[in-house]
Image (spheres, helix red, strand yellow):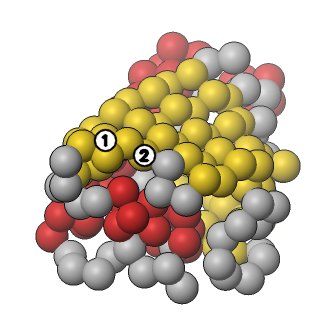
């Protein structure tokens, strides 16, 4: 199963970073632009078992599915797995670093043969996913460091 993992230091406390990621999943396409859409299926707030629907753009191929929260520890950890679409797990780890947050995101995923057959090759896909995650974290850092009150818990 391919995996991509990246970390970043964000000049915001874990409450802000966690709140933005966990409690505002519909904003994910703002910072992780490979996602064309992310919307809640279950109502806020985000809790164990919360579900959201997504559209992921993998090199021009739109993959639709749903995510479910499998583990959540406020301001520390969020684990989300897909229940349809591409089999994948998204793990977010939030560690305090003074007044900042050290955020690590790890994504494990499986490429179905039908998707793989439509795309160039596995190495190209893996490299693209690494770049997409790196860009996503930099976008997230920019949003959280330059916009007040982004960690809304609603």
Q: Which mark is residue 36?
A: none
**Residues under numbered marks 2 and 1 in contact, where contact means CB atoms less than 8 Å apart:** yes
Residue 104's x, y, as percent? 41, 36
| Closer to us: 100 or 106 | 100
User: Residue 154 occupies which quadrant of the picture?
Assistant: bottom right
Secondary-structure class at tag 1: strand
Q: Residues within 10 Å of mark 2 (few under 14, many from 20)?
A: many
Q: Residue at x 66, y 70 (%)?
A: 46
Query: In the image, is residue 41 above or below residue 5?
Result: below
| Closer to us: 72 or 69 | 72
Residue of label 1: 102
Q: Residue at x 65, y 78 (%)?
A: 45
First-in-chain label (2 vs 1) = 2
Q: Is residue 55 visible?
A: yes
| Closer to us: 94 or 6 | 94
Q: Is residue 115 left or right of residue 21?
A: right
Q: Which mark is residue 94?
A: 2
Q: Residue at x 33, y 76 (%)?
A: 150
Q: Residue at x 79, y 23 (%)?
A: 113
Query: In the image, is residue 149 above or below residue 121?
Result: below
């Amino acid at each position: 199963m391919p995996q991509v993992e990246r970390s970043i230091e964000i000049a915001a406390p874990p409450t802000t970073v966690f709140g933005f990621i966990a409690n505002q999943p519909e904003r994910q396409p703002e910072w992780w632009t490979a996602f064309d859409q992310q919307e809640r299926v279950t109502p806020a707030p985000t809790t164990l078992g919360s579900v959201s629907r997504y559209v992921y753009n993998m090199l021009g191929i739109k993959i639709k599915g749903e995510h479910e929260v499998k583990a959540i520890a406020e301001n520390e950890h969020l684990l989300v797995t897909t229940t349809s679409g591409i089999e994948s797990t998204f793990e977010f780890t939030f560690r305090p670093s003074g007044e900042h947050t050290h955020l690590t995101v790890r994504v494990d995923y499986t490429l179905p043969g039908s998707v793989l057959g439509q795309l160039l090759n596995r190495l190209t896909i893996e490299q693209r996913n690494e770049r997409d995650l790196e860009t996503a974290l930099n976008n997230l850092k920019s949003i959280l460091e330059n916009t007040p009150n982004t960690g809304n818990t609603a």
